[in-house]
Every structure is written in structure tokens, then in C-alpha cells.
Amino acid sequence: MISVRAVNSCSIFRSSPPVSSFRCRLNSHLRTTTSSSHHDRYSKSGFGFPMFRFDLPSLCHGDIRRYSLQSFVDTVLEELASYRKRKRQGICSAIKLTTGGEALDDKLVNQAVEKGLLVEFKKDSERVLLAVVQRRDGKKNWMVYDQNGVTSSIKPQQITYIVPGVDNFDQTQISSFIQKAQQNLDSSLLEFAWIELLEKNKSVTPEELAEMIFGSVEPLESYCAHLLLSKDDLYFTVLETKGSRSIYGPRPTMQVEELMRRKLAKEAAEKELQEFVQLLKSAKAMPSNAKPPKTSWVVEEKIRCKIESLEAYAIDACKSNDQKRIAGMILTAMGMGKTASSALNLLIDIGYFPVHVNLDMLKLNIHTDHPDEIISAAEDLLSEPVDPDKINRKDLTHLKVYAIDVDEADELDDALSATRLQDGRIKVWIHVADPARYVQPGSKVDREAMRRGTSVFLPTATYPMFPEKLAMEGMSLKQGEVCNAVTVSVILHSDGCIAEYSVDNSIIKPTYMLTYESASELLHMNLDEEAELKLLSEAASLRLQWRCEQGAVDTATLETRIKVPNPEDPEPSINLYVENQADPAMRLVSEMMLLCGEVIATYGSCNNIPLPYRGQPQSNIDVSAFAHLPEGPVRSTAIVRIMRGAEIDFRKPVRHGVLGLPGYVQFTSPIRRYLDLLAHYQVKAVLRGDSPPLSAGQLEGMASLINMQTRVVRRLCSSSLQYWMIEFLKRQPKEKKYRALILRFIKDRVAALLLVEVGLQATAWVSLGTQIGDEVQVRVEEAHPRDDIISLKEVVV
């Protein structure tokens, strides 16, 4: 028996004293008798071994009297056995059980619930309480007074254990009882009981376990044994339960070893979690300029795993349930709710994310940096340039060349030239950058560009389709330098239609790099020395007129552009520009790009070149039906809402009804758009006298993948722009008023509005009497960029 082992070996229990010490304590009680009542004994001393009166045989050696240790132990064992038998009979009688030798005949016979009993019951799914039975509550239920001082009604099914040997328990002593029980719990006792019971292949009840490990079946010891068994998830398992009685059996050795391994792993994981939580709390408490850099969180594997789980949770992109579980545990340990916004706020608070982190960029897994092998391959292309079209390039360096783009443009794809012929017609040249001079279909750099599909232009950064050095230094057009290009030259009839055209590999020398604003200013100044720019504007007007005659629909509207130069700062500066697409300079450039696209479609058709021919079926749009709307954003928005989507054919041109063109191929942005680059591969091969490298079927398959990526990028750019527009409005004075055009009514007086100064569309209630196209004044009531919420209120004058 385990209680005997406590006497014979000081190594059994962690707190066991040496035998000599144990013997001394017993000698001091040799003449002490057991207490008459186990209730009195519990109330006075709580938890202890019984005291015995017996005589010990002695041995004399010289003048020194010594006791025989073996005789002493034998006597103790006899007294213990006698005491246990008496106590077992008493407890069995108390719980209405019978005993046959060493075992209970029926271990699952329940003790009847009576007033004054001390019971454990299940309060809810998480709480188990100790209580004293007060009285009946109806036919089946009982009123109990629990350890928290609360009286409640419970069902018999809620009772999980009846403490044996207790009558009329004093309810004021519940807390003391629990405290003593907790003080005497030692889970290591279960290990020794498990070893003995496993060897004998025996089951056990709480009372039997109490007798084994404590040498007593008194109330406190029995309840302690019950707590040890009911809370144990390592050594014992429930074999059978009936009401408040349960029988437990020892688990097999292999199962215990596996559970122990899991337990140790869990404890180690909990320790790691607490250490990580401390790191989070420490970083959170630091000032913003002293927080640890993002890289410091990914150096150590254990930390990196947890921070990545939090990041995945923040963007709703957990790859496994394990990531969700880890993130949830971290948030709970931090006292935060298990939500994506909580994870995001935590990552911002520790400095892992900047305040204005672009979540959509993370969610959509947009590629930013180029792999090292691609950068290396790009540098090789720059160091050893090979131009397969060198001998066939037309020298156009004598032309005055205008490159017009936004002021912060990094990649310049196109430029323009113009002259008036002797017969009065206008000849224009559209010069397009020639990246195919460096990159060949199927090469490493080409495959990476295809994977990206397009450059990404965000308010906070630009992520080019090609490695930056190759795009900027090799492919992009540069002012005052001789550059390779593919030039489309067109002679226009007086009505704006194409009279003649040619497509050539060329070299040019850009004269001016102009922004749209500076180009518009030069046009407005009407300088004689910039006659070529005036000719380009005249040609653009002719082309617009001609396209409208072919059924084109003018969809010019307001376009917002934002640049945030320091996005990592908590309060970065926001530079917002609203551009009117009907502006002369913007109209000039867009018309020339459309003209180039028409020429390439015609050239492809004449030479049977598979190309991404874009078209849009005529939607039978009766433009006159919108004549009552103000020209500009209001009318354009109404028309765009009913237009059909574009289509692509890879074998022949398709009419583009909205543009008013018989055919159209995007060709002017090969550094930024991969489909434009594919068109370059095809056209340049024919110019060289070779067959196009790609069939129509191959183009179609590639375009399907590219368009998917392009749609993702377009969605990202749109959401990023929306975020920064709302952030811009959030920072403005609350009393500031904005001009807003009513685009349409959504329901009753709730209207879709366009904020003219910002270029943002939002909704607001407008007063009676206002109509579509009217201008109203509004004020921003709420602006929450992270939640994409903007609330406007009309200012009634």
C-alpha cells in the first residue's frame, strides 16, 4: 500500500521526511489515542494521519536502550490495518455501501441526497462549485448554499460528487474546507497510485484512492482524492459514471507516456506564449520612435511563427487552423478580442505595421520586390545590350519630341511629335518605348513580368513590372538622350481619319519632359516656338470629332491622383490632385494613344498578326437621351453605367463602339502592361521579317492569366486611392464645406454625389427640389478610412 511506502521510504513523496524524523514524531505520540469523532478531528486539525496507542518491543545493548525498527514497522502496520478496517466500515455505512473483504460490492450505488450533505455540483459548462444541501425544491430539485454564498436550485443530475461521511455540514465552513483541500492536493500522489493499480489491473473510486494515498477515508481526504481523479488527465480515465459516483481506471503505460509528452509540449508552448506576450507588451509600451524594427520579429523561428500567425489573422488569410489557434491564444493573453481588427491594432501598436498599412496589398499577395535572380538577369541585359533591330531603325532624332505624363512618373513609355505637311495635312508620330529590345519572350525577366502582369501604382509607392534599374535606365525614354523606340507615324485627313500610316523601329531624342499642367500652360500661352505642340492639340481635336462621328461616347470625368511621400509616418503628408480628363493636355495624350492603337490594329489585320484586339459591342447608346444632363462627370457617369464590358479577340480586329474605332490594340505602355509588351513581340517580329512568336491560342491563354492579375491590381489601386481620399477628408477642418454634384438618386432623397474638390463619390441625403446634375454643398460628418466609411451631410444655405 502507498501509505505504507510513505513510512518505509523517504523517496516516495517529495515532502516525505527521513525515517528517523518520522519515528521521532511517532514516539512523541506513542501514548496518544485516536480522536473519538472524525468530524471533530477534521474541524481541529484538518488533514492528518490517525494516532495510535501501542507498546514497542525493545532491545538492550550495553546501557543504551534501542527499539527494533522492523518490530516498530510491523506494529505500525498492524495498527494501520485495524484502523482502516474500522474506518472503511464506518464510511461504507455512511454512504450505504457494503464491503466484502477489501473491495466494495457495488461501487456505483449512489448516496441519497439529503439536507446537510456537502455536494459538488456543475454550475455551468465551466464552473464546478461546492455547496451544502438546504432543502427540497419541488419533487426532484434541491436548494443549495454554495461556496460563493449564493442559494440556488439544482437538479440531481448536476451533482458530480457527494462528500462522504458528512452530516449537517456547517455552510460557513465551505471556504475553509476548500482551502484545506487545495493545500493538500499533490498530483504526484496519483503517479504512485497509478503504478500500483496498473500492476494489479484494478479500478478505483475516490474513497478507495483516499485510503491508498492518505490512509483515511474521512471527508477531507475523500474529497481530495475526488479532486485529484476528476481533474487528472494523465494517469486515470473514467470507466463508468452513475449519478454522482464514478469509477476510474489506470491508463496503459504507453498512453500515459504519450499524454505526458503532450503535456510537456503544452507547458513548453505556454511558456513560449507567455514570453512572446511579454515581448508584445514591452514593444507596445515603447514610444513610436523606439519600437523594434519589423525585421527583429522574424529573426527567431519561434517568434516569427507567432507574428506571422497574427499577421495572417489580421488580414483574414490564415493558412491553417493552427495559425488561427495561435493568434487567438495571443490575443486572449493580451486581453483583446479574437477579431481581425484586434490583431491589426496590436501589430500597429508594436510597430510591426505602420499606422496606415495597406491591408489589401497583403491580402491580395501583391509582388513588390523582384527576386535576386531576376535582378541579376536584368543587370546582365543592361551590361551586354544586344539590339536585333539596330540596322533597321529609322533615325528620327531630328524631330522635336514631347513626353507628357504626371510629374512623378518613373517609367516614360511614350512621346509625341507633329508637323504640318505642305499640303496642309498634319503628320504625327507616336513614339513608344522599346523594352522588347532587351527582353525576349520566354526569358527569365519576361516570365517574371508576365507573372506580375502590370506595374502597380499606389499613392504610397510604385512597384514596376520590370526590375527598377532595367525599366528606368534601359527601357524608359529619357530627355536629351538617344533612345530606342517603336514609332507609329500617321498622316491625318482634314476630317481626322487616317490617310497614311507606318510602323517602324526607330531612334529618337526626347526634347521635353512635360507634366499635364505644364503642357496645358504651354498650349494656353500659344507660343510660336511650340508650334508642334499646337499641332498635336489640333490633331487631337480632329480625332475626337471624327470618333464622335463614328459613334464614340465621351466619358471624360474627374480623376483623382494622390501621392503620399512618407507613408510609414503616423501622420504622413497627403498630396491630392484632381484632374479633368477633358483638360486639353490630357485630351491630347489620350487621343494620340487611341490613334496609335487604331493603327496597330490595322497593321495587325493587314499582316495577319495575332494580337489582343480590344473591342466593345455597340450598346445602342442613345447619347441624346442624356442631353438633359450637364456635360462632364454627371453625363459621363450616367452613360458608363449602361455600357457593356470590353471583349478581346486574338485573331482579328473587333469594333470598339464606345471609342468609335474599327479596331484597337493597346500598344503604348509596354514597360507597364504585359499585354502591351506581347503586342510589341508580335509586331516587331513581323517588322524584322519573322513570323510572330505567339499564336492566337497562346495569346489567349496568356491573356486570361494576365487579365486576372490585372483585375486584382486594379481593385488594389482603387481601394488604396479610396483609403487615402477618406484619410485626406478626415484631416480637414470639421466646418469645411465641399462642392458636390448629384450624379443620381439611389432611394428617395439619398443621392450619389461626386465631391468636386476631391474626386470622391459618396452618398448623402439631399433636400427636396434638387435634381440630378445640381450642385450642393456638403460637410463631412464622419470619416473612417480603415472601414471605408464616409458620411456626408448637406449644408442647406
Image: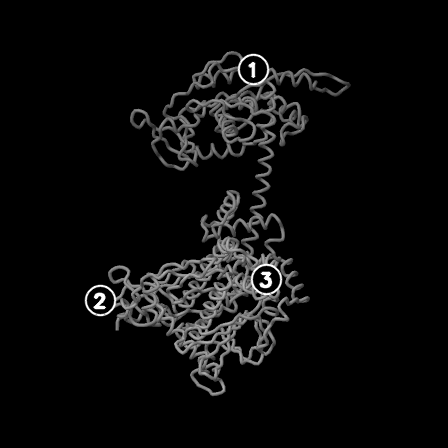
What is the distance, in whole Å, between disc 1 and disc 2 at their CAs?
A: 100 Å
How far across and down, in percent of the image, does residue 409 sit? 52, 71
Q: Nearer the viewer, residue 362 or 370?
A: 370
- Position of residue 47 relative to residue 277, above or below, is above
89 lies left or right of 781: right
Q: Secondary structure at mark 1?
A: helix
Q: Which mark is residue 690?
A: 3
Tag in front: 2 or 3: 3
How far across and down, in percent of the image, does residue 745 sit? 27, 63
Residue 220 visible (yes or no)? yes
Tag in front: 3 or 1: 3
* Classed neighbour count for the residue bearing mark 2: other residues with Cα under 10 Å, few (<14), some (14–19), many (≥20): few
The extreme top residue here reads 100
How far across and down, in percent of the image, does residue 693 sit? 57, 58
Q: Earlier in the sequence, mark 2 or mark 3?
A: 3
673 lies left or right of 748: right
- Image quadrant holding the C terminus, namely bottom left
What is the distance, in whole Å, between disc 3 and disc 1 at their CAs?
A: 110 Å
Residue type beneath disc 1: Ser
Q: Earlier in the sequence, mark 3 or mark 1?
A: 1
Residue carrying label 1:
82
Q: Secondary structure at mark 2?
A: loop
Q: Quadrant of residue 778?
A: bottom left
Q: Secondary structure at mark 3?
A: loop
Residue type beneath disc 3: Asp
- Image quadrant holding the N terminus, namely top right
Residue carrying label 2:
768
